Amino acid sequence: MTTQEILEFISEQKTAIIASVNDEGYPVMRAMLAPRKIDGKDLYFSTNTSSSKVKQYLDNPKACVYFYKRGRFKYQGAAIIGTMQVCQDQPTKDMIWRFGDTLFYKKGVTDPDYCVLKFTCQQAEYYCDFKVEKVKFD
Amino acid sequence: MTTQEILEFISEQKTAIIASVNDEGYPVMRAMLAPRKIDGKDLYFSTNTSSSKVKQYLDNPKACVYFYKRGRFKYQGAAIIGTMQVCQDQPTKDMIWRFGDTLFYKKGVTDPDYCVLKFTCQQAEYYCDFKVEKVKFD
């Protein structure tokens, strides 16, 4: 697997699981909708500024994202370690905003409760059935 | 949701994602087969003693496990925080061993590369579509 193939695999999945470390040092996982944008080794998610994950990533940007595809006879998964940056600047919020997002963020693209999570990939483990491959992002 | 309902939901899923914290402080996720046994608030998984997750849990038992069910119109997930104990004692290894496991552990039930991960649930977040419920295990 190359990093490009990992990113292609990711781009085909509809959900992601993201992990942070909470203030007691426990890993915490949550499901997310697929990244809004993949740009090089950066993945962009939209989320609520008031959510506990935003607080956790502001305190500690160390993160992991997981993507999987479960077929009838085959399981594929990619776990990527990296850093999660909380972006509250308007240009990034504008870039990620989509028509219909007012359903989640009532005040629109400038809603202070709307922010962007930018994950930068460092290294991945790709699982296919019972085999694992490690890949580093430059 | 009661803790009992969470445990029932878990028992119906075929895969789990487990998270540890590595020695650089990053959360790390991996897919696992469903727990071999659920006993009260303890979940038992079988694994290779030589795996990196065993090293990570011996160094730091703080853990999270995630179970999900993705239907066509509905997503359910349960993220549970707790501790992961690495069990290498023979009675626990005997209890979890199943016929056919020699496929993974060549030397059988006493194989030093076979061990048991015992996860004890502390608190859960149950997701159904975009709602979340928190549940504490006593």
Image: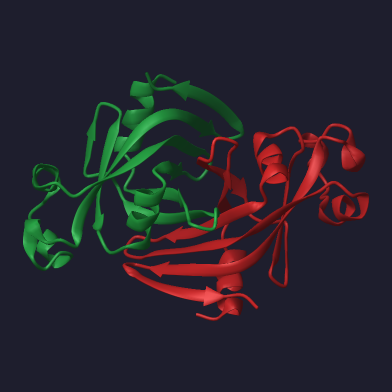
Chain colours: A green, B red
The C terminus of chain B sits in image quarter: bottom right
Residue at position x 53%, y 33% from top? A127
Q: Is residue A21 left or right of residue B81?
A: left
Task: Classify B28 as above or below A3.
Answer: below
Classify residue B81 by image quadrant: bottom right
Residue at position x 61%, y 71% from top? B7
Residue at position x 56%, y 75% from top? B136
Q: Nearer the viewer, residue B130 or B64?
A: B64
* Residue A69 location (% of width, % of height): 43, 42
Q: Is residue A25 left or right of residue A84?
A: right
Residue at position x 25%, y 26% from top? A40
Q: Nearer the viewer, residue B58 or A103?
A: B58
Task: Classify A20 as above or below A100.
Answer: above
* Residue A70 location (% of width, % of height): 47, 45
* Residue B51 location (% of width, % of height): 69, 34
* Residue A129 location (% of width, % of height): 57, 35
Which residue occupies the extreme bottom position in the image?
Answer: B2
Q: Nearer the viewer, residue B95 or A90?
A: A90
Q: Is residue B102 left or right of residue B132?
A: right
Q: Is residue A58 visible?
A: yes
| Picture mark count | 0
